[in-house]
Amino acid sequence: VDSLGSEVDAKVADDIAEDDLLGGLEIESTDEVEIPDRLVDQVIGQDHARDIILKAAKQRRHVMMIGSPGTGKSMLAKAMSQLLPKEDLQDVLVYHNPDDGNEPKVRTVPAGKGEQIIEAHKEEARKRNQMRSFLMWVIIAIVVGYALLLAGRPLLGILAAGVIYLAFRYGSRGTDAMIPNLLVNNSDVTSAPFEDATGAHAGALLGDVRHDPFQSGGMETPSHDRVEPGAIHKANKGVLFVDEINTLDIRSQQKLMTAIQEGEFSITGQSERSSGAMVHTEPVPTDFVMVAAGNLDAMENMHPALRSRIKGYGYEVYMDDTIDDTPEMRRKYARFVAQEVEKDGRLPHFTDTAVEEVILEAQRRAMRKDHLTLKLRDLGGLVRVAGDIARAEDAENTTRDHVLQAKQRSRSIEQQIADDYIERRKDYDLTVSAGDVVGRVNGLAVMGEDSGIVMPVMAEVAPSQGPGKVIATGKLQDIAEEAVQNVSAIIKKFSDEDISEKDIHIQYVQAYEGVQGDSASVTMATAVISALENIPIDQSIAMTGSLSVRGDVLPVGGVTHKIEAAAKAGVETVIIPKANEQDVMIEEEYEEMVEIIPVSHISEVLEVALTGESEKDSLINRLKDITGHALDRKVGG
Ligand code: ADP
């Protein structure tokens, strides 16, 4: 099955496949999905970066890739090395220099020749040694024969034989020194080299000369034999990839720049105290294409000259975090699952419904309407965990159930803390999800990037001695003040209570370290209004939303995670901003558990959350009067 089909097929498929998670792809398992040969064709999304890599490979230009981890930067760099011509590859040999032992000579030959040269040298040395030992035994035979038969002094004969033996042994040492050191060997490679020098120390990046503990007296290793190549030398005619480029120390960045500029770089010992530091080879070729990568602040901290070097002689490209969720893309994500399975080599292929579940996760992780996440390293992690679970069960295929288990298992640290926290709170019964209480609202917040949590807010209003204050616990002071300010404009108009003469206390019940509170203003406003008017709030409801001065409910982040957290905590109804309606992508198991009510104005929130019919009705009628037409649609009926 050609998973991507022809363009016409794809168009037809797209029309019927809008709702199909696999984008119209009909497979039983990912085993049937064809994977392109070239790595560059396996890259999903990142069209801009792909185009640049193709172009840069042709023109041998440097590339700088900026973007989130796990979006395919090193994959593209590797793909680039496969696009470079193999014919140009070279072997590099280091020879003993008879004039100056500390300045070994460097020779470059076409790839494959290096091994032949070494072989020839060894063969020659072998022959020479054979010749020598033949000669040695002949001389020994003559001397011993002479001593025994003619001189009649056997002891002297044996002694003389020993001396001759040692002399030959010692003398032949020099011939080994003549065999060159094959520094870079490209004889068996299938494509131009790809060298990943991320986090490399100076020696690994720039080459090194090993220390020689003997240094003289016939025991020493000749200096040319102690020379070791760096990544810049091994990457010759290929790609040198450096991720997190800004973490490379400045000296190394400077030397890297020299290597790029000169196209060659001598190797010397990197540690000053070692005898290797005395050795300095002739220049070794470093004619590589550099692919530097990092996140946004990598650019700020990287050596400006190095950056301008890359910029002046190459391209800069920004990596995408998400991509439009289209049927074609979904088919590619199915191929992504197949790629990851093939790459691992041991995982059972995924069934169609298992792939659907991965694509659902890609939607959820995009955190953006109608998009799929391109943080594919992490998504690949999910694929591997699911596959491992299937493999442990000896299953023939990885199924939807395995993927669901994997999601459970591959929770982030924040998620694990949040779940643990929810568990503990259940023990203490802190989350109230039944009954009516004045001034208490189940708010919803996000922990880390992807964990929702129920965070009850309590408000109390008391007459103030001086001018009224808003008093909140912890870091939430600013948010609390802003929320109260926003509601106060509305409250002033319908309430007889003058809140400027009151202290409003707002408390988060067990606020938790690491919780983001920016989306809590609707929650706080509701709690304050309830406390002020003494109208109870239905505790089976949780809510999230940001509030404008006019009482509009504005969109917030993380609604999916928040709704799931509410469902887990036993909440029955969740109020969310209407503008967030399309961001809701909760897992099936939760759909049955909660009712979701999208709202666009605070009066709608109160309509749903407040209990005690008569007071509530009068309050909402007053609110409606004030805020006018904005409410007519929803509240009137
Ligand atoms: P980065 O260098 O941006 O941190 P990598 O290229 O190392 O990310 O990505 C790690 C792995 O994730 C890749 O080997 C590949 O399996 C998968 N991956 C990441 N991005 C993509 C992509 N755009 N298309 C296909 N696979 C990807």
Image (spheres, helix red, strand yellow):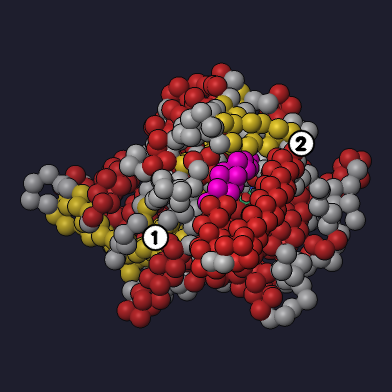
Nearer-the-camera pick, 250 or 581: 250
Nearer-the-camera pick, 185 or 46: 185
Lower position in the chain sequence, tag 2 or tag 1: 2
The disc label shown at residue 443, or none: 1
**Residue at position x 57%, y 52% from top?**
168
The disc label shown at residue 86, or none: 2
The disc label shown at residue 258, or none: none
Tell me residue 164's x, y (percent).
Answer: 55, 55
* Image: 300 above or below 545: above
Nearer-the-camera pick, 329 or 535: 329
Relative placement, left or right, of 371 versus 110 is left
**Residue at position x 75%, y 60% from top?**
342
| Image: magenta residue range | 170-184
In three-dimensional space, the C-alpha distance between marks 2 and 1, rounded to whole angstroms, equals 61 Å
Instruction: Tell me if the residue at label 2 has its CB under 8 Å from ligand 1.
Output: no
Give the class, few, some or many, for how many residues have Cα within 10 Å of label 1's Cα (few <14, many ≥20). many
Relative placement, left or right, of 627 versus 293 is left
Q: Is residue 497 visible?
A: no
Looking at the rendered structure, the secondary structure element under dot 1 is strand
Tell me residue 248's x, y (percent).
Answer: 43, 38
Question: Which picture quadrant has residue 500?
Answer: top left
